[in-house]
Amino acid sequence: MSQPSEAREAVGDYKAGWHDPENSTIRFDFGLSEQVVRDISELKSEPEWMTEMRLKAYRHFVDRPMPNWGNTEILEGIDFDNVCYFLRSSDQTGESWEDVPEDIRNTFERLGIPEAEQKWLSGVTAQYESETVYHSIREDLEKQGVIFLDMDSGLREYEDIVKRYFGTVIPFSDNKFSALNTAVWSGGSFIYVPKGVSVEMPVQAYFRINAKNMGQFERTLIIADEGSSIHYVEGCTAPTYSTDSLHSAVVELIALPGAHIRYTTVQNWSNNVYNLVTKRGVAHEDSKIEWVDGNIGSKLTMKYPAVILKGEGSHAEVISVAYAGAGQHQDAGAKVHHLASNTTSNILSKSISKDGGRGSYRGMAKIMPKAENCRMNIVCDALILDEGSRSDTYPTMEVGNASAHCEHEASVSKVGDEQLFYLMSRGHTEAEALGMIVNGFFEPFTKELPMEYAVELNKLMALEMEGSIG
Amino acid sequence: MSGEKPILVISNLHVGIEGTEILKGIDITIPSGEIHAIMGRNGSGKTTAANVIMGHPSYDIEDGDVQLSGESILDLEPWERSRSGVFLSFQYPQAVPGLQVGNFLRKSVSSVRGDDAAKGAAFREDLKNAMSKLNIPSSFLSRYVNDGFSGGEKKRFEILQMMLLKPRLAVLDETDSGLDIDGIRTVAEGINEVVRGTENGALIITHYSRILEHVQPDRIHVMIGGKIVASGGPGLASLLEENGYDWLEERVAEGDVFE
């Protein structure tokens, strides 16, 4: 255990920064080797093909150089030998809330999960360390034939579906971190929505990194069969630790013809976390994939939710916000590839930087030569709160078909003294006024969130603004 | 108690910005229940006076004092002044994209008048009444503060805020500019409602006398070159309207007093 004061000093004033005593049943030594990969797979009693895939991915990870773009300086600071790649914090998945160990339950209760569930959740899987410890599905979901499991259970119980889709959207060779994830993944969600089924309520999972130097490599796979729809919500907070944590998830979405998947993320990592996530969906004919992605905290986030518009008439929506405070770099954006005709996409990206933080928009929008009558619309806005903070935009558009209709708008603004004075003249302190401006800037994102997330995000930003006033 | 003291006393106020003196010794006293007006051309220092009363951080107070009901407010931050009962209707209200009018009004009322004033049926009733008096449709509440508002909508929104915040002292900076005649009448009714028959006060800053016909201020102060050159009753506004500022300046130079 590190000294609390030392931890605070190292990572700053993180508002959700508590942690439980580590009560891990199984913990691997630090560092990664082929044996560690084999051991993880064996411990989970996985089928041979998964073990093989993990090993191939591991070898690719070792051979693959670090990305030479993004914030290479911070990336090079990752010490892969100083990461624990597997940790199991309770022996088995709890069947009901009461079965979950008490200290773990305390953590969840502080996150407000049981109450939230009563109000609006249709199901909860909460990832604690590497595996799911609590998992409930409401009866109506089961009755509809929806499968909602943690990924490990998904592989055990629905091996044929997993084998068919796992790694098809994001192969391990996609990038260094997708290779790492494929080698050592643990936990995450597995969802299958049968044909024609609409899941009315958002389905939620809550992720949290608790152990020091704990890499978290969750793997999520969502398949929405023809004409079905689902809204999946994940929220993340991480407690305070004095050394760096690595979070490298892979999320694959498959929207079969006519299906609709919305994937909402609000992440609030403590500012020593490397958040290097690959998210991608494939949209078949007349389907729709929406990424709603909020990034707060972390040391470095590199995340570009992607949609491959494979089927004619499919649609992509990527709405993201990023908040970069002191010592943080949010390198976020979106990627859309129009492979088929009559496909449409909207990208809205908003970033705020403060106290020397850096927000970058990085986008890749591509229309293939054979794709006729495609439309894409990209808007990126940046708000800079003080002098030393930074915002950059790296947009790439490749339009291979002349019938395409493309729009790109970018703006950078600063908070003005007159705007602050106006709000202060209505009885609001400077911090409150700043909070109003910032939350207003994020509003196009916030209004897409389930109510409780919107409230939580607004509170969080207001807290951040309080800290900024001297 | 507060009724015995003037709502606003500005005494010998000297104000500069970046080394240039803009207000060169202003004296204005507004007894409670009265509405006063400052008239003057562009650049005479009217807006500076309004901003200084509200506490704009860009100005340097070189001398003098501003008192609200006998207490100096110069050391207070803008929000503290607001919570003490000062309100400024801005000449150029600022847009805050993403901040909904309804939320903003509730938060402002809560900050200025306390949480209870911003809750429940009483607040909703208040809001409904004020909006209907100002001919503001309820769809307005879900728009963003001053974002894409027309000139007239901005001014009406300022008055709506004034009516809900119920200030002791309302300062209205060029609230009539950009309004048609119906708008001016509506705004004037709002000002009268906040001040007449109360212990509150208002200071209207304008360069036209149009709004004054509807408000009937108790006193008019004419500002030229950072000084009040003449003060008088309502008749002063019409004299000014007929003859112009040059004429007034000459008469003042010749020693006329417009009481």
Image (cartoon, coloured by chain):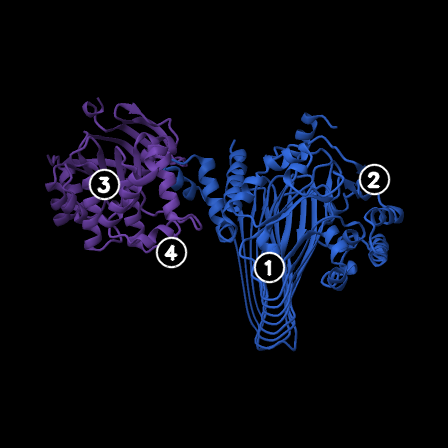
Chain colours: A blue, B purple
Local SS, label 3: strand
Residue annotated with mark 2 = A28
The residue lying at 14 percent from left, 48 percent from top is B241
Q: Amino acid at mark 3?
A: Ile
Q: At numbered mark 4, what does the secondary structure look like: helix, strand or loop? A: loop
Residues packed near mark 2 inside 10 Å, few (<14), some (14 to 19) or many (20 plus): some
Quarter the N terminus of chain A occupies: top right
Query: How many other residues sit within 10 Å of disc 4, few (<14), some (14-19) or many (≥20)?
Result: few
Q: Chain of mark 1?
A: A
Query: Could you tell me which residue is drawn at 29 percent across and 49 percent down?
Result: B155
Q: Is residue A30 visible?
A: yes
In the displayed structure image, the side of residue B94 where residue A314 appears, left or right: right
Label 2 chain ID: A
Amino acid residing under circle 2: Phe
Q: Which residue is mark 4?
A: B148
According to the picture, the residue beneath numbered tag 1 turns out to be A144
